[in-house]
Image: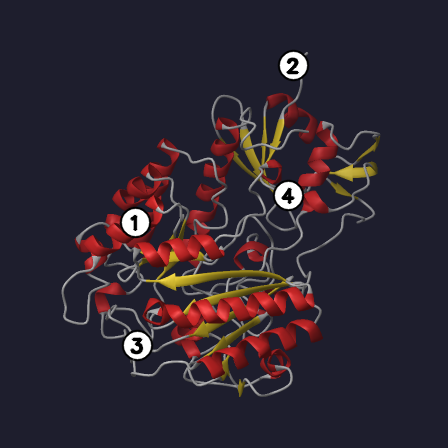
Amino acid sequence: MTTPKILLSSDSKDFSAREECDCACADTAVMASDIQYKVGGRLFRPELHFQPLLDDYKVVFNPKTDSDTAVLDSSAMSILNSFQSTRSVRLEDPQNVVGKMIKAGLLERVDGDITQICAAPPQILSAWIHVTDRCNLRCSYCYLPHVREDMSLETGRAAIDAIFRSAVIHDYRQIKIKYAGGEPLLRFSLIEELHEYANRLAGEHDVALDDVVLSNGTLLTPAIAQTLKTRNIRLMISLDGLGQYHDSQRSYAGGHGTFDDVVEAVMLALDCDVIPHISVTISSRTADGLPKLMSWMLKYDLPFSLNFYRENELSASNIDMRMDEEKIIAGMLAAFKIIESDLPKRNLLPSLVDRANLSSPHSHTCGVGQNYLVFDQNGQVAKCQMHIRKPITDVHVADPLAVIRADQIGVQNLPVQEKEGCRTCEWKNWCAGGCPITTHRATGRYDVKSPNCNIYKTLYPEALRLEGLRLLKYQDDPEVVIAL
């Protein structure tokens, strides 16, 4: 008899790796693979999502609970289907096939003992530090007027102090700092000083520190890249397409394109052994060019995130950028085809579809109003960088995070259970209803589903299929799969 085979996404070595973005990304929750589960009692197969893969394999996913992406062969599928009627089992080894099905959320206990973790509190306190409002670019979707103001060292240190005060009060053991702007490399000397100061406080408070520079790349030099490498500061570079596709959205203040300089920066970073994370903003203006960009990123094995354009007051006149469903879906599916032909070793579930992190369930789209602080160049604190001109408090309060959480006037990042059109959706724990600012701009409400809902629902199954194919391709590769 053929030994049943089940492959789990959580068995990937990089499963908990954090993808980078220029947004208040949702914190990755504790996954089913980390939970102590019982392997006995009365079990049943809940309603699941199935998609055929290669040969007799299927990708199986339970989108309504805290699930794991699984790939099953026909023998494992037969075992899973035997639980369409409730069965009693007694297992000793949690690594056997039924134990792994329980682990993946494909089988549930009648008594409901499988732990629900979607509401687990965020584990990381994240902060955006706006080191300057100046920028050498004039991107079509930018939400900033770019006044000529810089953050002082005194204000920067006060922001770092405020972050650590809130972290200690709320018992966060990890802090993530995003140095941003404007173009933060205009103030790289300040970033160096703030990084050293934050490192010292992290040691004093026994808190893990992770920091990243969010850059347009055009000002990167070998000296800066070497400093990033030496000080273990990560780098994110924005690249929206190849050639004219990128230039159509990201040009210099004088109007000429930045593509050649950005690509040169990516190559420079790689030469210095700095792996830049590529942030891609997709609009109807650039969707057609996404497949070629994807081929280029895969060629150099670059980590990336695909983010949807968010209209704002300054970009609203760019009508050709608005999210045309047909264009966006066609461009994304074409890019997925490119990925399928050249599957990377890394898990792509956190980075494939805008703010949806399909590697982890979450009740909120992002960290806004929960575990996220935005400090402007003057020390004012906002809930989201897109609302940086609408501060809620400042660096001098004892606990800025508590003030942000208590605010009922600014952007409201509601749990998905409170959003009309989301409550009964099978993807609710993974999508969480989309960006609240985008939804409010389109509808005037925070308690409804995203205007991009149809795009998301079309793309999620295809993203899971890619993960299933990746698991099959690398199932015997010890660099990818944890040895059991």
Dot 2 falls on a residue whose secondary structure is loop
Question: Which is in the foreground here, disc 4 or disc 3?
Answer: 3
* Residue under numbered circle 1: 268
- Horizontal side of 229 relative to 396 (left or right) equals left
Q: Give the percent coordinates (x, y) of residue 36.
A: 78, 44
Q: Which image quarter holds the N terminus?
A: top right
Dot 1 falls on a residue whose secondary structure is helix
What is the crowding at mark 1: few (fewer than 14 residues within 10 Å), some, or many (at least 20)? some
Question: Which is in the foreground here, disc 3 or disc 2?
Answer: 3
Q: Which image quarter holds the C terminus?
A: top right
Q: Which mark is residue 2?
A: 2
Mark-to-mark CA distance, 2 and 1: 50 Å
Mark-to-mark CA distance, 4 and 2: 26 Å
Q: How is the image coloured?
A: secondary structure
Three-letter residue code for mark 2: Thr
- In the image, is residue 368 above or below residue 332? below
Mark-to-mark CA distance, 3 and 2: 63 Å
Three-letter residue code for mark 1: Leu
- In the image, is residue 110 above or below residue 284? above
Three-letter residue code for mark 4: Glu
Mark-to-mark CA distance, 3 and 1: 24 Å
* Residue under numbered circle 3: 134
Dot 2 or dot 1, earlier in sequence = 2
